[in-house]
Image (cartoon, rainbow, N blue to C red):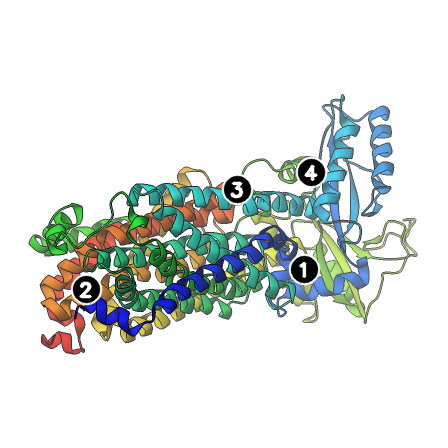
Amino acid sequence: MSSRNRTERRVPTWLRVLLPAFLILGWLAAAGIGGPTFGRLSSVVSNDQASFLPASAESTTVQEALPGFLGDDEVPAIVIAVGEDALDAEALERLEGLRERLAELDGVVETSPLIPSEDGRAAQLVALMDSSGSAGEVPDIVEALRAEVADAVGGTDLQAAVTGPAGFSADIVEAFGGIDGVLLLVALAAVLLILVIVYRSPLLPVLVLLTSVSALCLAILVVFELAKAGVLTLSGQTQGILFILVVGAATDYALLYTARFREALGEVDSRWAATVRALRGSFEPIIASGGTVIAGLLCLLLSDLVSNQQLGPVAAIGIATSILAGLTLLPALLLAFGRAAFWPFAPTPARPRRQQEGKGLWAGVARLVDRRTRAVWLATALVLGAGAVGVAQLQAEGVPSSELVVGESQARDGQALLSAHFPGGAGTPTQVLAPEAELEDVADALAGVEGVESVAAVSEESPAGTVPLPVDPASPFADAAPTVVDGRVLVQATLSDAPDSDEAQAVVREVREAVRAVSADVAVGGTTATAIDTDDASERDRALIIPIVLLVISIILTLLLRSIVAALVLLATTVLSYGTALGVGAVILGWLGIAAMDPAVPLFAFVFLVALGVDYNIFLMTRVREEVARSGHREGVLRGLRVTGGVITSAGVVLAATFAALGVIPVLFLLQLAIIVALGVLIDTTLVRSLLVPALALELGRATWWPSALARGAR
């Protein structure tokens, strides 16, 4: 009796029909429920940098105390208007009328008096916006504000803009606005094009893409419900990474399974038998590679930053749904369509597979690695090492908030106008929380720091809302007492430099040292301090999480391959390719004129590239181990390279293309991550997995598998 008959007789016909039908219908139902959630996901997304800081951060302490002094849920927007010459009476009257109209807008709590600049060419006002959501979202209020401003200065020589925290927030939200549509469409189009080229089949790419989209719909549904319940916190960058990661990973797992299924169809006639063989051959590498990625991502839970912490479980959910779809939905679809899925190049058992393996690109690569083993791994390692030298150009100390949006930004333009005619920190002061008894000493310490333009205490009794320090007896606000909440006062220091500049950060660091010399109970916060604390936390995260990720992945590889040597080789080559990607990426970004990098970019790139890079090596080495057990070490390594070459390279190109799609979102963080990760994935799948790892395995011989039985030649 044939193996086909034995296999199929053990499984009833009704089960072979109903099981795939049940899986397909179940996934279609999940996609139908999760699909509409795409448009709702943005409702649970927050891009407020301060909300992602740990509770222990100094700026968090100040942020939590601000409502007691400044009122709840108020975000300032700064309106700046500049004339070609000194503003005349007509221009000032026009701007005063604008101020009155802005005060009447829904969502604007109050507006400050018009403040002229010393050179007479500019004037500014501050509009406080309700961020509670009761009058609409801040970006919508800013849009209405900008429309009023444009209308007021239209037909004049005045140049005006809306900037400040509310303006930058609106620009960031607008930049992320393409995540739900443009990003996903670009990623899916890129994947579809690559799949059509790879498979030369009209149906198979659609089945693979359906698998990826279904996995994404389920991931979105789960993440949305958890975020809605307050279990997870989402940012715009986390949302974009989730989309890309699921589409790329699900497609990779689908490619691996499809390769095994196609291979099985070339050996047996039965679709059911081919499915069983394909699942047996792909289950372990897909579970192992997906589990490795999940383990690496969950290490982000050790981060101090909530945004980094939450990316871990969110992305892990996406990988889990990708694994599930790759091992259930796609097998069911291919079982249903059989050889028709591969038309017009459907595989048949007519041609021996080993005869086919002797031809083509990957057979040639295997011969090169076999004949020039040492030259191949030495040359590849030298090329990768040369690329890694570019790390010396890396500038990952932080990016000014005005540079977060790539391309047009009214808030950035407005900040430049503001800095040209007012102190750079005007309207966005550094907030200092101090004990009431230490007010005068703290004010003196602040005034003594170079770069602090003015100092004032918040006061409810003052019509201006603040009292300048030191108090001028001739001032009309001299009798207004500072507001005291829980024995503390809030002092505002206006800096000479723009709040997102390196100079402002240096001043705030000096401010912290100066006020701590007065009292240990003083806390310094505000926009600049928040950026400092965020960057410092990111740098601590890098130092902590990277070694832990390496340890976790090395343990997983050792257990999977039953070999310490193989695990160390794979880990070392993956880290080398990460260094190359980071170095080459830094050079490319320098050429583009955007060398400054968010400190979280190298960390995220490391987690993705090491976890995903090991993915491809797992795909290779699990197959190599299988072949070594059958044919011996040398032939096993070369055959594993030949049969996995096409599928792994295709998977790498797909993942690189999906990450590159992040570049369509005009956010600097995502652009930098897209360049580095796409480079790293291509390096992994072309140089590392194709040349370096197989050549090292041949160079080490059977010692590659130490201490397992394969190291002793057992089969």
Number of residues whose C-alpha sits closer than 10 Å to that of mark 4, classed few (under 14), some (14–19) or many (20 or more): many
Circle 2: element type: helix
Residue with the mark numbered 4: 418
- Residue 706: horizontal and vertical position, in percent? 17, 75
Amino acid tagged 2: Val
Of tags 3 and 4, the one toward the viewer is 3
The local secondary structure at tag 1 comes to: strand
Which residue is denoted by mark 2 in the rendering?
A: 624
Residue 15 drawn above or below residue 499? below
Whether residue 491 can be seen here: yes
Camera-side residue: 113 or 662? 662
Q: What's the amino acid at mark 3? A: Val
> Who comes first in sequence, dot 2 or dot 1?
1
Above or below: residue 286 compared with residue 124: below
Residue 348 vs residue 99: left or right? left
Q: Are marks 3 and 4 in contact (CB under 8 Å)?
A: no
Q: Nearer the viewer, residue 330 or 321?
A: 330
Disc on res. 525: 1
Badge 3: few (under 14), some or many (20 or more) residues near its Cα, within 10 Å?
A: some
Residue that badge 3 annotates: 182
Residue at the image position 54 percent from the left and 40 percent from the top: 406
- Determine crowd level at label 2: few under 14, some 14-19, many 20+ residues with C-alpha closer than 10 A: many
Sequence-wise, the earlier of marks 4 and 1 is: 4
**Residue kind at label 1, given as amino acid type:** Gly
Label drawn at residue 433 = none
Task: Give the Cα distance between marks 2 and 1.
Answer: 56 Å
